[in-house]
Image (cartoon, grey):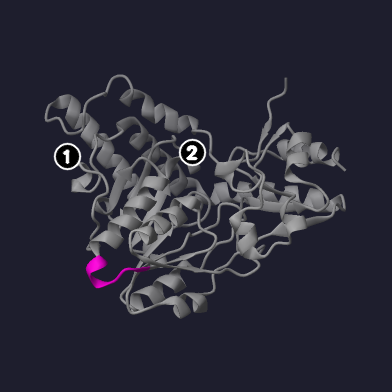
Amino acid sequence: MTAPIYLDYNATTPIDREVVDAMLPYLHTHFGNPSSNHAFGVVAKNAVEKARAQVAALVNCQAEEIYFTSGGTESNNLAIKGFALAHEYRGNHIITSAVEHPAVLEVCKDLQRHGFELSIVPVDDKGRVDVEEIIRHIKENTILITVMHANNEVGTIQPISAIAEIAHSHNIAMHTDAAQSLGKIKVDVDEMGVDLLSVAGHKLYAPKGVGALYVRKGVHLIKQMHGANHERNLRPGTENVSSIVGLGKACDLIHKNLGKYIQNYQMMRDLLEEELLREDFDLRINGDKDNRLPNTSSISFRGKSANEILGGIQGIAVSAGAACHADDVTISHVLCAMGVPEDDAIGTIRFSTGKFTTTDEIISAVELIKTLF
């Protein structure tokens, strides 16, 4: 049986072979606890610190501003709850957008249930947040704005630097979930002006179960788990050394090869769209076509349902709706927020290419899709 064509890189990425090779010694030979003072622990500790420097180099920050976590969801929780609880004494209002991943929206809503105020700003028909909408929602008690860097479903890139500038002019902190953007476009915390930035390893060819949080020097958070004083007393728990090494190696590869990766992402994504449009299908491409991730294509197949499409193209691995809820083909909150008509939204499929995607795979995928029409 022929292996399916993988076009779901926004859901997760395969672990790069060079990442696996970097990890293996820390699964066998170098198994020490980084908190131990003996030679085994020192080797592990040095590996963690090397990885910290590699992540920092990719996002252009100091190594001590990077904290390792179990993934993007934990990073978002630590950033949002950690900041909100640490600064509740001066305000309790948070602003976010209508197209955030549940790992942000649900965190904000949980804080709302515990007495915080929450404003969810709308987006336009391209999924883009209007900076003026952010300004309209700012109050005297606003302490945090959290807006994703790029959307996981349609790929729209948000004006983070402009939002951060507005935030700082009002003494408000700025967090961004960069799970989808890191490894696909340039991510520079200084250029963006963010105070907090979340990283998910499995979105950039590193293992699942590892992530990182950038915390600008001087920003105070309250830790969300309690135990020993690992990660400079912000994230307790013995470090997942092998996976952290893998995350560091993945970030190093991106730092050295991002331009090449972007070229392949975009060539393959554009080829897919061009070939589908050439067939004169009744399609709608969602998102900001001029300002989106180079690998992401959200396509509505008019007159078809996502269930029908997925059932007919089992040789292609893609997502319908939000990537984390692939069993449920319902209209996603992102498409609803963008005002995509229901008849279009119900037949929406997200294709996402990666650094291993080939021309042959794209052509074969198009041939399979053609059998549906």
Q: Quadrant of the N terminus?
A: top right
Residue 5 or residue 81, whichever sits in front: 81
Say which quarter of the image contains residue 194: bottom left
Say which quarter of the image contains residue 35: top left
State which region is magenta.
Answer: 88-93
Q: Is residue 50 left or right of residue 97?
A: left
* Disc sitting over residue 137 in the figure: none
Q: Secondary structure at mark 1?
A: loop
As drawn, 326 above or below 267: above
Q: Position of residue 75 (x, y in %)?
A: 36, 49
Say which quarter of the image contains residue 20: top left
Q: Position of residue 204 (x, y in %)?
A: 48, 43
Crowding at dot 1, Cα within 10 Å, few <14 / some 14-19 / many 20+, comes out as few
Residue 36 or residue 145, whichever sits in front: 145
Q: Residue at x 77, y 56 (%)?
A: 343
Q: Quadrant of the C terminus?
A: top right
**Amino acid found under the numbered disc labelled 1:** Ala
* Disc sitting over residue 228 in the figure: 1
Q: Is residue 166 visible?
A: yes
Residue 195 magenta-highlighted:
no
| Label located before the other in sequence (2 or 1) | 2
Q: Residue at x 19, y 40 (%)?
A: 227
As drawn, 123 above or below 30: below
Pointer 2 and pointer 1: residues touching (CB < 8 Å)? no
Q: Residue at x 80, y 49 (%)?
A: 276
Q: Which residue is mark 2?
A: 205
**Amino acid found under the numbered disc labelled 2:** Tyr
Q: Is residue 60 visible?
A: no
Residue 68 or residue 130, whichever sits in front: 130
